[in-house]
Image (tube, rainbow, N blue to C red):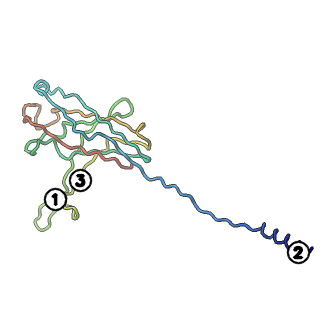
């Protein structure tokens, strides 16, 4: 009987001395997040018989640009064309448009958007410059000539909301040469393209 008790006690001690560990990592991946919000509605400026006579500018207008991002960012802008009428038979110089943003010091930073340009290349057979076409899509290739209009650090809409002010002045169209009645009566339009990306 004593021998049996000793054997049981020994077995218990052996089991208490055993352990095993397993481990694994827990990974959390944060993606790069950049999001821009702004109205894509048309913006209309209208001259009247009175203010076209002395080039009193139509009222300036503003458009809110909101960015949320977890990296530093830039917003660039370019224009697809000069201001053109519907069939592109007449135009106004892009220079009549000025965009302004606060510079953070009580002033503003101004720019006139640059116009995109179609990329050309020399055709060795003809010796002529010809438009470059994307081999996959068949669409023309453009150099957008985009300029930076806004930049900021990571943060939400609360810290990264800016107003871009638009102003029109016919005096900046050299073809009119300050005779504003040289502009044909029509509606002239261009499309501005804003792009947000990591700095």
Residue 9 found in image quarter: bottom right
Residue found at x 37% / y 46% = 35
Residue found at x 33% / y 39% = 65
Residue 3 found in image quarter: bottom right
Can you tell which of label 1 and label 2 is closer to the viewer? 2
Residue sitting at the far top:
50
Q: Which residue is mark 1?
A: 131
Element class at badge 1:
strand
Decide: is 6 above or below 94: below
Query: Does 70 sit left or right of 164 as displayed?
Result: right
Can you tell which of label 3 and label 2 is closer to the viewer? 2
Q: Locate residue 137, reporting x and y percent.
A: 21, 61
Q: Mark 3 or 1 closer to N-term?
A: 1
Q: Nearer the viewer, residue 162 or 123?
A: 162
Element class at badge 2:
helix
Q: Which residue is mark 2?
A: 4
How far is mark 3 from mark 1, CA to CA? 12 Å
Q: Locate residue 44, reporting x and y percent.
A: 19, 34
Q: Locate residue 118, reporting x and y percent.
A: 18, 54
Residue found at x 88% / y 74% = 4
Residue sitting at the far right:
2
Q: Mark 1 or 2 closer to N-term?
A: 2
Query: Does 145 sit left or right of 11 as displayed?
Result: left
Q: Locate residue 170, reporting x and y percent.
A: 15, 33
Q: Which mark is residue 47?
A: none
Q: Nearer the viewer, residue 25 or 183?
A: 25
Q: Which residue is mark 3?
A: 143
């Amino acid at each position: 009987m004593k021998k049996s008790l000793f054997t049981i006690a020994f077995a218990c001690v052996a089991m208490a001395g055993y352990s095993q560990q397993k481990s694994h990592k827990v990974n959390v991946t944060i993606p790069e997040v950049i999001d821009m919000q702004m109205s894509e509605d048309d913006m209309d400026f209208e001259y009247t018989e009175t203010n076209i006579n002395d080039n009193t500018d139509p009222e300036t207008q503003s458009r809110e640009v909101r960015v949320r991002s977890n990296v530093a960012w830039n917003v660039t802008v370019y224009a697809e064309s000069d201001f053109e009428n519907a069939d592109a038979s007449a135009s106004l110089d892009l220079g009549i448009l000025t965009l302004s943003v606060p510079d953070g010091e009580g002033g503003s930073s101004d720019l006139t958007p640059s116009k995109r340009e179609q990329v050309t290349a020399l055709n060795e057979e003809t010796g002529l410059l010809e438009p470059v076409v994307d081999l996959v899509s068949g669409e023309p290739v453009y150099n957008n000539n985009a300029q930076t209009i806004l930049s900021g650090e990571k943060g939400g809409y609360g810290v990264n909301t800016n107003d871009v002010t638009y102003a029109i002045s016919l005096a900046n169209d050299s073809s009119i040469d300050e005779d504003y009645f040289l502009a044909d009566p029509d509606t002239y339009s261009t499309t501005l393209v804003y792009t947000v990306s990591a700095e």
